Amino acid sequence: MMDKHAFFNLCLETVKNRFGSEEYEIRVEEFNKNNQIWKGIVISKRSASEFSGGPVVYPELYLEKFPNLLGDEEELRLFLDNLCNEVENSISGIDLGQIVKQHLQPECLRLAVTDYEKNKDWLAEGPHRRMADLAIYAFSTIKIDDDRYTFRRVTNDMLENLRLTEEELFAIADVNTKRGKTFEALSTLMPPMFLQETMETPGLYMLTTSDSRYGAALIACKNVLKEIHNQLKTNFFILPSSIHEVLVLPVCNNLNASDSVQLKHMVGEVNRTVVDPSDVLTDSVYYFDGETFTTL
């Protein structure tokens, strides 16, 4: 049976046979996808503008979605045909780089947050700021057409195109991110896996954005944590459930900072068993006392 390496090479050769010409450039690159390195096949028009990377094919990702591909020749043939058709539809008539350049506007900027150590090489390509063991960066939501959007992390080159300073970039993205803030109670009871039976059960809240995209960055936005502290009238834990949201757990009589080991175990277990690896933020647990953001 074909292995993953052979499958990648088959996808590469199929794409080269279909699109290999003077019009297109086909190359293999490695991409950081929030904590993970993916090996991809990039297909781009040689005449495309500077920000246009072209569609990227990730063969390993397809194997995760369709594990039976390697054992069924007919399924594999159909998959390769469909793959090339999707690539053709993605690149025909669209210069993504030109769209990015034309529609890269300050009102589309927002913040996102990621694990610093796991992504520091990728982060070095653009402006970012540290927050404990995390890094905050800016991205832009860009409309391709009526049905499609692309999310582009702001690189140093894009920052120059925006004609903004780094301070201005983060200030604008901060305001835009807070505009979509949602903070809602999930339940009046904690799930049993969180706490021992003897502990009092406080409310649990979710902090995210209205579109549930990169909402964990709200913990880095100016005054957001203080506003939550004023609303809850108590200190609280921050449990990163993914890059898209965090859970806020208020302190109660029988739950305090000394319980961080149990909470960290819970966060780590959920990350390993429930959250997609590309959406994992961190196994850390944080604590906010109204003034200071602390890693426990």
Image: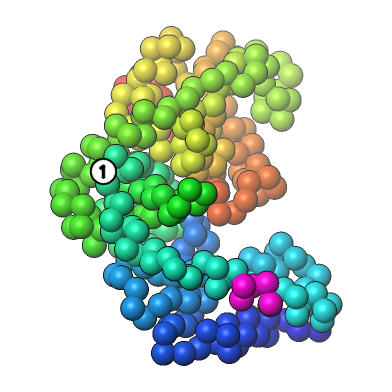
Does 84 appear in magenta? yes
Residue 171 x/y as whole percent: 23, 37
Q: Residue at x 49, y 22 (%)?
A: 183
Colour approach in the figure: rainbow
Residue 266 x/y as whole percent: 64, 37
Residue 125 x/y as whole percent: 30, 62
Camera-nearest residue between 241 and 105: 105
Camera-nearest residue between 265 and 161: 161
Q: Which residues are magenta?
A: 80-85
Tell me the amino acid under the disc marked 1: Pro
Q: Is residue 271 above or below residue 266?
A: below
Q: Is residue 226 above or below residue 212?
A: above
Question: In the rendered image, which quarter contains the N terminus?
Answer: bottom right
Q: Name the secondary structure under disc 1.
A: helix
Quarter residue 277 falls in: bottom right
- Reading the image, the residue beneath label 1 is 106
